[in-house]
Image: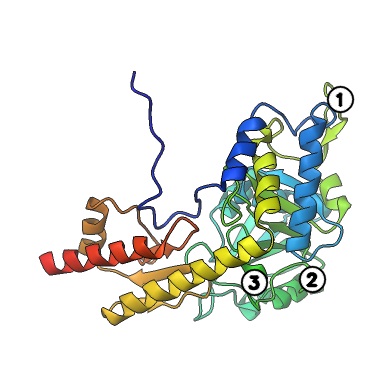
């Protein structure tokens, strides 16, 4: 049987995953068989996880971070909802989110039997604090903001949303799964030092360049993890706050290796290159008469006609659309300027052929 080959990243322009850093790849291979879900048995990987959480705390402005390396943003978002529900005494708990949130919150609401209240965003595609305030009530257990939306790369007004949560005696969660590794090099207010954030999702396996799966779930207080913990009677450790239980140490080790290799200057250079690429492709598309959403972070949305989208897909470009139909171009670390130049050449050829 012929050995299968993995997907090449050469023409992947809409994914929020990327090639892992070489040291992260090597670390993942070494720790594949370890289980950080049983930290007293697998102590080396448990120590690495402690290092990763400390590193993520430094990155997100949290001096005494609590948390663990999750499978990704979906798990971290589910855990944020679960912790908020478990810590509240609401009879019919609800979670208030902008419509720009990741679809994982729909999963969380279904699994955890909470009501998800979705609120329209403003004209700039960001959360609207006034509109969200209208949906918050005594049974609201969690308010959510996004720092780097998956469709448009927008950063919600995090301090204003944190104030709403505090006024309602609710928890506040920030989904920075994609944006968290680029936002430290911007002037946005988005993390624990900028506002009273209770929990956060931040993924090393995106711009952090760790191997998949390596997400991050961070909490301000140990009590948040206590609210998630269940007894584990047959393990050496006596309780577990994670959702997945057994998990490969590959994600933990690769996240530690990536942080060691890249934080902070490597990540700064990656962000600056990606943002420059996003600005370049936005200008090229605008010059060709397309309606382009300006790239606040390294993500460009453009209103591209369907026949051009299909033609580019036929040429091997891996693309996706927003819910409103725009083409999404995500300038991840593997996306080079030459890749974008080739994309533009193909776009021009497709237009000329139409």
Q: Is residue 19 left or right of residue 266?
A: left
Q: Nearer the viewer, residue 144 or 85?
A: 144
- Residue that numbered label 3 is attached to: 185
- The spot of residue 287 in percent (x, y) is 29, 81
Q: Nearer the viewer, residue 243 or 65?
A: 65
Distance, label 1 to label 3, CA atoms, is 41 Å
Q: Label 3 near label 1: C-beta < 8 Å? A: no
- Residue that numbered label 1 is attached to: 236
Quarter holding residue 338: bottom left
Q: Is residue 247 left or right of residue 20?
A: right
List the single residue furthest toward the left.
Answer: 353
- The spot of residue 237 in percent (x, y) is 86, 29
Relative vertical location of residue 302 with respect to residue 198 in this rendering, above or below: below
Q: Label 2 near label 1: C-beta < 8 Å? A: no
Are there few (<14), some (14-19), or many (20+) residues within 10 Å of tag 3? some
User: What residue lies at 75% left-to-right and 33% top-to-bottom?
Assistant: 37
Distance, label 2 to label 3, CA atoms, is 15 Å
Which element type, helix, strand or loop, lies under badge 1? Answer: loop
User: What residue lies at 76% left-to-right and 74% top-to-bottom?
Assistant: 194
Query: Would you say residue 106 is visible in this rendering?
Result: yes
- Residue that numbered label 2 is attached to: 193
Marks 1 and 3, the one that precedes in the sequence: 3
Relative vertical location of residue 291 with respect to residue 206 in this rendering, above or below: below
Which element type, helix, strand or loop, lies under badge 2? Answer: loop
Distance, label 1 to label 2, CA atoms, is 36 Å
Marks 1 and 2, the one that precedes in the sequence: 2
Marks 2 and 3, the one that precedes in the sequence: 3
User: What residue lies at 65% left-to-right and 31% top-to-bottom?
Assistant: 30
Quarter holding residue 265: bottom right
Quarter of the image where the N terminus is located: top left
């Amino acid at each position: 049987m012929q050995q299968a080959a993995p997907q090449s990243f050469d023409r992947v322009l809409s994914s929020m995953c990327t090639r892992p850093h070489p040291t992260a790849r090597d670390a993942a291979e070494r720790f594949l068989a370890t289980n950080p879900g049983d930290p007293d048995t697998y102590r080396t990987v448990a120590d690495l996880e402690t290092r990763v959480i400390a590193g993520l705390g430094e990155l997100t402005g949290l001096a005494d971070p609590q948390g663990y390396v999750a499978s990704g943003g979906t798990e971290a978002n589910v855990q944020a909802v679960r912790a908020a529900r478990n810590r509240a005494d609401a009879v019919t708990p609800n979670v208030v989110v902008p419509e720009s949130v990741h679809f994982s919150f729909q999963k969380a609401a279904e699994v955890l039997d909470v009501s998800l209240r979705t609120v329209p965003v403003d004209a700039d595609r960001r959360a609207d604090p006034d509109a969200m305030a209208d949906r918050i009530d005594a049974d609201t257990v969690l308010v959510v903001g996004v720092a780097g939306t998956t469709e448009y790369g927008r950063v919600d007004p995090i301090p204003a949303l944190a104030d709403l949560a505090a006024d309602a005696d609710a928890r506040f969660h920030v989904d920075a799964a994609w944006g968290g590794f680029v936002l430290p090099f911007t002037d946005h207010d988005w993390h624990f030092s900028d506002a009273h954030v209770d929990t956060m999702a931040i993924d090393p396996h995106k711009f952090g360049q760790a191997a998949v799966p390596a997400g991050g779930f961070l909490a301000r207080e140990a009590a948040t993890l206590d609210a998630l913990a269940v007894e584990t009677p047959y393990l050496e450790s006596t309780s577990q706050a994670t959702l997945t239980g057994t998990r490969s140490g590959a994600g933990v080790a690769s996240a530690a290796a990536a942080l060691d290799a890249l934080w902070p200057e490597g990540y700064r250079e990656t962000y600056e290159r990606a943002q420059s690429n996003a600005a370049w492709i936005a200008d090229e598309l605008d010059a060709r008469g397309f309606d382009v959403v300006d790239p606040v972070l390294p993500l460009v949305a453009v209103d591209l006609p369907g026949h051009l989208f299909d033609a580019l897909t036929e040429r091997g470009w891996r693309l996706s659309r927003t819910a409103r139909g725009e083409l999404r171009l995500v300038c991840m670390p593997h996306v080079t300027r030459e890749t974008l130049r080739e994309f533009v050449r193909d776009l021009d050829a497709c237009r000329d052929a139409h």
